[in-house]
Each structure stands twice: as C-alpha cells, then as structure tokens.
Amino acid sequence: IEMEILPPSQQVAAIKSGKYDIVFSPELNIFPEIEKLDNINILTRTAMAFSYLGFHVGKWDAEKNEVVTDPNSKMYDINLRKAMAYAIDNDSIAKQFFHGLAMRAPSPIAPVFTKLRNPEVEGFKIDLEKAKKLLDDAGYKDVDGDGIREDKEGKPLKINLAMMSGSEIQEPLSQYYIQQWKSIGLNVELVDGRLLDFNNFYDRVEADDPAIDFCLAGIGFSSDPQQVSLFGKTAGFNISRYTSDTLDAALSATVSPEAMDDQKRIELYKNYERIFMDELPVVPQLNKYEFLPVNKRVKIFDWTESRRGFGTEFDWSQLELTAPEPIVDSKN
C-alpha cells in the first residue's frame, strides 16, 4: 500500500487515469466531473457533521470554565435569530453550491441517529415574509426609509459575520447569505471585509472577539450522540456562548442513568431537540454527504456507516484488486 498527498488541482486527472485506487477527501467541486467517469465507483455516506449559524450571545468564563450568556447582547433576541434563519434557502444551497451532496439540517442531531430525531422537526425553510414579520414584531424597523432596519432604539444596526475561506464556493456562498439578509432589511458584513483563514477564524471565535456578532461554522459528531460537549454550559465548543437552565437540564438528561433505557433515551433526546429548536442556541444549516472515488478494480472496500462507530473496523488486509493495473476512464 502506497499513500501520497494529492493536490486538489490534480485530482480529476489522477482519477481519470487510474493513478490511484482510492482518493480520500476529494474536493467537492470535482464531483460533477468525476460523476461521468466509467472507471470508478463513487461511494457516499452521510458526513458525521453539520454546519450552523452560531450567534455570539455571551462569553467564556475561564475561571469557572463555563459559558456566561448576556441577555443584553446584540444577537440575543431569538426573533432576530429566527428571522435570519428564515431568510436562508438551505435546500437551494445544497443543490447549487454542494451539487446535491447536502441537505437542510432539521435539527442538531446527526441524521445517522434516526431513532433519536423527531421526523416532524423540519428546521427552517425559507420564508421571507415570516422573517420580516418577526423583525417587525421584535421592533427592528426601517426608521429612515433606506431599506435597512435600525435596532430597537432606532440606531444603525450592523451585524458582523465571520466566515472561513477555503474552497472556491466560500466567497459566492458568503455573498448569497449577505444578499438574503439584506432582502429582509438587515445590514450584514463580513468581519474585516473578507473571509478568514481557518486558524484566524477559530482563534477569534474562541476568544469571543467582540468584532464578531455571529459565524458560519461546523461541528463534527462522534459515534456517541450526546451533545453536552458541544452545547453544554461547561463546553468550550459552545462558541455561541448560549446556555439556559432548561437547555442544560435537557442536555444533562440525555446522559443520565435514566437514559440507559432505550425507550427513555429516545424520549429524552426528542425533548432536548424540541428545547434546542425553541431556544435556538445555533441555527442548523446543512447535513452533508461525503463521497469517495474508488477505482473499479478494487474489491471489498467497506465504507459503511457501521464501520465508523463501535464494532469491527475495516482491515486493509481484506481489500482485493481484480486487475494488475488500475482501470482507466474509457474517454481518457
């Protein structure tokens, strides 16, 4: 077995020519091209992660090692957060930006945990009129008639978004978000007027940089469905800095001795999911799919969901090759 680092720009050509049997972590933007190739099988599975809008509503108390939520923070009003959620069409984002390899995230619970999710919870579907009404009712009005809403005191309202650079879709995606929020009368701008690199993004978000009002981020799941370590009061990963007695109690219940009972655990997770969506510490955006190009000479390669959790891991000694050389695309 030989492994090499493959630059993104060389991925399509390498897959076409059969240079590699398997290409791990392929670039999203190559999917439309490799989907047409006849020398590979494309394996897919639901990614153990979701993206979300995290609104900065507090800070991290380093002495107590806990989240402190500030009810007076700019983004604390849940109607503001809900309005911004209703302005985004995640179904279209999944289709246009992710080539169909994503779906609207209805809740924070990973889709692989089917029994723990309430199928009636659908997340936020785009509804601009509902978004505008929420803002109107909450007191965010366009006082001077310029099409942009002021805050509840009639003062200018600018909301700063932190978003990471990276793939080629990040820039147009950021502009889509900003455009949608402008359509409901909100002035949203990128922090520093640009996308932030990965390290800068997380350094500033985790340090509660006051220049950041909210961010588009992502969280990975483990084979354990618990989310105390993601959204709990003492969770450093809780970058929105939101906590409440009801949310923390619901989270704690999911990892209590009572939750050892299968049926009770389902009940407790659905209660947590309901409270989460009612209080909205973050706004779920997308669940995504991973894909893996595998040359057709490869036999017995297991990429199933079950292999990522507990149980027998895939053993490379099980893999077989059915030809002495990788198969080349017939049109190559």
Image: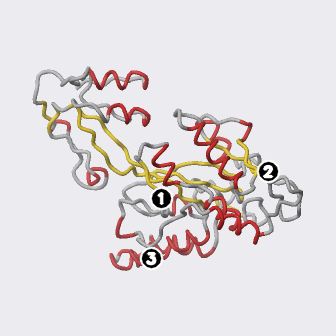
SS state under label 1: loop
Amino acid found under the numbered disc labelled 1: Ala
Q: Which residue is mark 3?
A: 268
In the rendered image of this protein, does residue 25 appear above or below residue 177? above
Residue 85 falls in which quadrant of the image? bottom right
Q: CA distance from mark 2 to mark 1?
A: 27 Å
Q: Which mark is residue 158?
A: 2
* Secondary element type, mark 2: strand
> Is residue 202 visible to us here?
no
Between discs 2 and 3, the one toward the N terminus: 2
Above-or-below relation of 199 to 183: above
Name the amino acid, label 2: Lys
With 183 as the anchor, is 176 left or right in this view? left
Categorize mark 2 by other alpha carbons within 10 Å: few (<14), some (14-19), many (20+): some
> Which residue is tagged 1?
105
Whether label 2 touches label 1, CB < 8 Å: no
| Circle nearer the N terminus (2, 1) | 1
Q: Position of residue 329 (x, y in %)?
A: 23, 25
Viewer-nearest residue: 1 or 179: 179
Distance, label 3 to label 1, CA atoms, is 20 Å
Q: Position of residue 232 (x, y in %)?
A: 57, 64
Q: Within 10 Å of the Cα at label 1, are there few (<14), some (14-19), or many (20+) other Cα atoms? A: many
Residue sitting at 33 percent across and 75 percent down? 262
- Left or right for 36, reference 50: left
Q: Check the image and report above or below for 8 versus 129.
A: above
Residue 9 drawn at (x, y percent) = 43, 22
Q: Quadrant of residue 37?
A: top left
